[in-house]
Image (tube, helix red, strand yellow):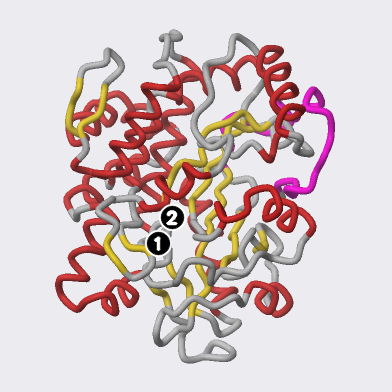
Amino acid sequence: MLPTKSDSRPIGEHRFGDGEPFALGVEEELFLVEPATGVQLNAGPRVSQEIAQPEVGHVAGEVHACQIEAITGVCSNVGEAMGQLSELRERVLATGVGLLGAATHPTADEGDGEISDADRYQLIGDLLGDALATPVAAVHVHVGMPDPETAIRVFNGLRRHVPLLEALAANSPFRHGRDTGLASGREITLRAWPRSGVPREMHDFEDFRAHTDELTRIARVPDYTFHWWKLRPHPWLGTVELRALDVQARPEHTAALVAAVHVLARLEAEADPVPGPPPELLDEASFSAGRSGITATLPDVDGVMRPVVELLEALLDRARPVARELDCADELESLRDLVEQGGGAGLQRMAFERGGIEAVLATTTTRPSSGDAGS
């Protein structure tokens, strides 16, 4: 199992190389809701007490009591990770709650999500104040690194792909009962959080360590896990972690996005380094991705503005051989299906056109089966 978020050691005591190179781990944050209506529930403490944890992977609480996080163990490929996530979701559903797969709850009022009781989350609440008024939900993807140097190489290489991945994953057009005019309300909500964009490129692991230690000191936070970057090396887990993806309502969309991250990490580990964009340009591209989702126009590696569909085809052309090697070729190709369906944001808006906000809640909510406890 992956170490817990409370693990705390000096950043130099890394775990790069402890496991299989390019092993995979996925964390999926989901809203807890009343099954019949999709209304948000602050049921995290009850679910944590009642859930039967599996032998591999686990379900954990989140900053807000209206959410849980399904965390896989260390996996060899996307299929294995998705299998574990499916079992974890079923175990949560067995407690009688529903699960909503959107990165912002479509109808919950601002401030309805209570802060969880754990010391870490109470500290985050004290640090961020009203920046936490709207809970957000993401998919985090960890890819194991063989050594610190490769971790920095992959981190630097993945930076320029973040806006495209955000555009493909955008799945939160509604919050507080209205259409935000954005494909990802989560992207805009997180702009109120400190240390939540994409940091600059790092020269090497020592540069990362020194930069991170200094930022931790200046921010007066306990450790680097309070740096909520969209992308970061994670020395205590021995991974590079991509944190920029909206959570998805459909498992096949999650699988496609996880495959993209897994393949890109492997590609960037072996590619010749290419200087990436500065944080200011990445920030602008991320805003465009959050605003427009799959219809966004974003800069390619040369800075040429291109539609998401063109950038996706270029990614697929480059990535297919590695996807076959990593046993995720089908999942990667299904990114096309995600785009053709309109992406998560498009599917939510189509549901709204059919039946209003109630239809949005219905299309993003998974309910317990009739045999589950409490249903």
Q: Dot 2 lies on which element?
A: loop
| Residue drawn at 20 percent across, 53 percent down | 342
Task: Kindly report the distance in space between the C-alpha atoms of the residues bearing marks 2 and 1.
Answer: 6 Å
Q: Does 348 appear above or below 244?
A: below
Q: Which residue is mark 1?
A: 102
Task: Give the quarter of the image for residue 279.
Answer: top left
Magenta segment: 2-24
From this viewpoint, which residue is outermost toward the front?
Answer: 130
Task: Give the quarter of the image for residue 93.
Answer: bottom right
Which percent across, then down, holds residue 313?
A: 21, 31
Left or right for 85, reference 301: right
Left or right for 250, reference 208: left
Which percent across, then down, holds residue 24?
A: 56, 41
Q: Which residue is mark 2?
A: 247
Label 2 close to label 1 by CB (< 8 Å) = yes
Q: Nearer the viewer, residue 322 or 16?
A: 16
Q: Nearer the viewer, residue 106 or 244?
A: 106
From this viewpoint, which residue is outermost toward the right?
Answer: 9
